[in-house]
Image: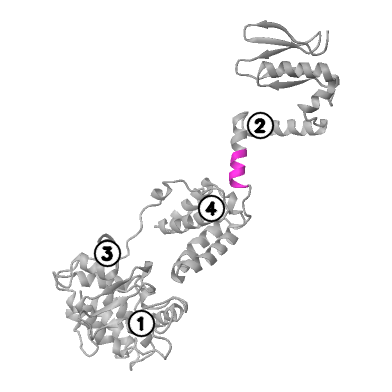
Amino acid sequence: MSEFAKVHLVYGDFCYIIANQMKPTKINNKGSPWSVAIPARWTNDGKRKAKYFKNKDDALAFCKLCKDRGPAALSEYISPIPKTEAQEWETMIRWAMKELNGDFSLIRESVEHFKLTRMNIKPATIREAVELFQTYRRTVKDERTVRSDGPRLAKLINYFPDIQLCEVTKSQLIEFFDSLRKTHGDILSIYKSVHVFFVWALERGYIGQIPLEKGTRKTMGKFGVNNEFYPVETFRKMLRIAAGLEPAGKEETSTRDFIDLLPWFVLSGFAGLRSCEAFRVNLKSDSVKWSDLYFEGVAEPHIQISESVAKGGIPRGVDMAPALEALEAWLPLAPRQDEGNPHIVRYTSKKIEDLKQAFTKRTGIKFIANGFRNSFATYALAYSTLSGLGHVSKQMGDSEAICKRHYAQWLPTGSGKRFFDLRPLEVVPAVTAAA
């Protein structure tokens, strides 16, 4: 009898193909492949092998080919593996099965995860990736936004000083945010910056997937609401010191050291402009100009916040009469810029920040985060029954919901008039200014 014979016996779903006279090979076609035994003397390692086929016809065709051509037929179906390589494969599979608790299906999942997170991924530590991210952000965002993200992302760098970005896991990030809860009451802002960073990293090929699952943000709490505003007397004092009408702190005479803060105080306090709209973040950015003030020669006086100045690129106008009257009274005291620079605030954010620190040191007055814009919203809503939420939010370039939640606080109707009536040559008694 030949080494490879035809079908010898058929019993129901089972078929036996004889590999040699002594050891038949059982072939089961119930969802399993058909197999044919290969004699030991025909294999490289001297061991009997099995060759699998999709159906019985293919198995029988292989038997016939082996009968006609002998061992040469194996080259069309089997790639001989050296004995040492076969041992390496066996060792690797055994190790993988041990690591995966014997679950063979997890090998495929592990390979898929590796392909997703590590293959074709640009290598970069978290520090390197953050530096690239911040460089990119400076081309599409204003410097103020980039700077606000910096300290938040620095916490991520400090927590993972040497790890590759693609190696960060979901559990590690959860531990990172959990560590912040001990020292930070509101970590949602940090989460937001970190999430934007990971989205950028995914788009640029530094990671294969974002380790933060959908819905994670809900576990970070809610954004805090910072709607503190300046009392009328405090704002009056700030205006007069900046304008050189009152001394700073314990000084005996007034000073003009802070004159360049005055137009910012006036534009943001009386007109509700954002700081990045009132003065330039850097020399490449834009801010409101003298030519944007339409006080005379127009049917409807207003301030024009152009597309290049307004946050989000949505132009708007400020036409609230009490605000314009206050600006007309205070802005003539501000220095006019040299020829070639038309901006009302002649310095950029770095110089303004230096002046702020010096102002606080000499006066003892601390700046409130977003305090001028908060003050405008609060006092504008309390000015009269005509200055409703819709009107005020339109002046600020925000929705009514945002204006109400983040800026305005309730004051008795009419109390806001004292704020907008502040004038350079008019003294407001302290007893009437405690709004």
For mark 3, what is the residue? 403
For mark 2, what is the residue? 98
Q: Residue drawn 61% across and 38% down?
A: 110
Give the mark, 1 or 2, whose residue is nearer the N terminus.
2
Give x and y (percent) for residue 284: 47, 77
Residue 214: say if magenta: no
Residue type highlighted by circle 4 = Leu
Q: Nearer the viewer, mark 3 or mark 2?
A: 3
Give the mark, 4 or 1, whose residue is nearer the N terminus.
4
On the question of residue 433 being in view, the answer is: no
- Range of residues picked out in magenta: 111-118
| Label 3 secondary element | helix
On the question of residue 153 being in view, the answer is: yes
Give the mark, 3 or 2, whose residue is nearer the N terminus.
2
Figure disc tally: 4
For mark 4, what is the residue? 202
Give x and y (percent) for residue 7: 72, 9
Crowd class of label 3 (few under 14; some 14 to 19; many from 20; radius 10 Å): many
| Label 2 secondary element | helix
Residue type highlighted by circle 1 = Lys
Give the mark, 2 or 4, whose residue is nearer the N terminus.
2
Residue 117: say if magenta: yes
Q: Which mark is residue 289?
A: 1
